[in-house]
Image: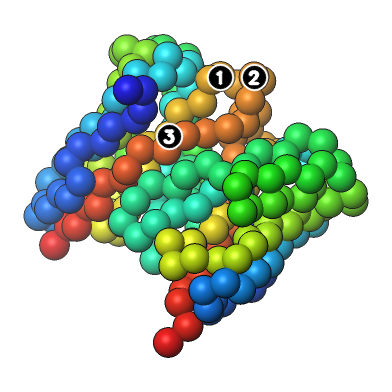
Amino acid sequence: DGGITQSPKYLFRKEGQNVTLSCEQNLNHDAMYWYRQDPGQGLRLIYYSQIVNDFQKGDIAEGYSVSREKKESFPLTVTSAQKNPTAFYLCASSIGVGLAYEQYFGPGTRLTVT
Amino acid sequence: GQQLNQSPQSMFIQEGEDVSMNCTSSSIFNTWLWYKQDPGEGPVLLIALYKAGELTSNGRLTAQFGITRKDSFLNISASIPSDVGIYFCAGPSRGSQGNLIFGKGTKLSVKP
């Protein structure tokens, strides 16, 4: 059953700690994305990766880091430098840049930092 | 910068009613996507439009790519309770090939 998985669903951390959110896909998609969603807001792009071992900053990359060592995986680290990390984080994937704009989303991780 | 404006921001539906919402942009788009998000879940792709004037259906949902290429419309016929949620439009980001920008969504709720 193909899809995108994100874990955990809920994550709680103390201020000042780094935390890594997992995203895995078995759709054989080349491109992967991380978005942040705040209440009443649309989705804002944090980072994206068009191919393994390459990634680019999105609109709100400050305080976040990513890696893309495998095609299937695109973990996001929320660092202590992120001023307001509490949010709903969504991972997505697509076939590849230039092939289609259709992005498919995982179920999301809700991060709460206190 | 690029922005997608969705209207209305929120609306209440009664079972059986038809629902209409739209998305407008100040710039021309060559692709429009419509997503639905249930509370606490990721958005689900409903319809993708790639051609001006195109009308595409997915069950009770019908979306249209406006002929000006600056707007798109989503209609839901004979709404049912499970239609509640947030509907987002999305289009290609001018700055980054392959990336999308999203509207802020239209929230559908059930009439009290």
Q: Measure the C-alpha gap from mark 3 to mark 2.
A: 15 Å
Please, what secondary structure does the residue beneath circle 3 have?
Answer: strand
Q: With A27 as the anchor, is B32 left or right in this view?
A: right
Q: Earlier in the sequence, mark 3 or mark 2?
A: 3
Q: Measure the C-alpha gap from mark 1 to mark 3.
A: 12 Å
Work out whether residue B75 or residue A63 is closer to the camera in this orientation and state it: B75
Q: Quadrant of residue A4?
A: top left
Say what amino acid the circle numbered 1 marks: Gly
Say what amino acid the circle numbered 3 marks: Ala
- Give me the residue at 42% from left, 14% from top: A28
Is residue B27 in view?
A: no
Could you say where residue B39 lies in the image, as x and y percent from the top left?
A: 35, 60
* Chain ID of residue with mark 3: A
Tell how many labels: 3
Identify residue for label 1. Answer: A96
* Chain ID of residue with mark 2: A
Q: Which mark is residue A92?
A: 3
* Chain ID of residue with mark 1: A
Q: Which mark is residue A99?
A: 2
Residue at the outermost right position: B68
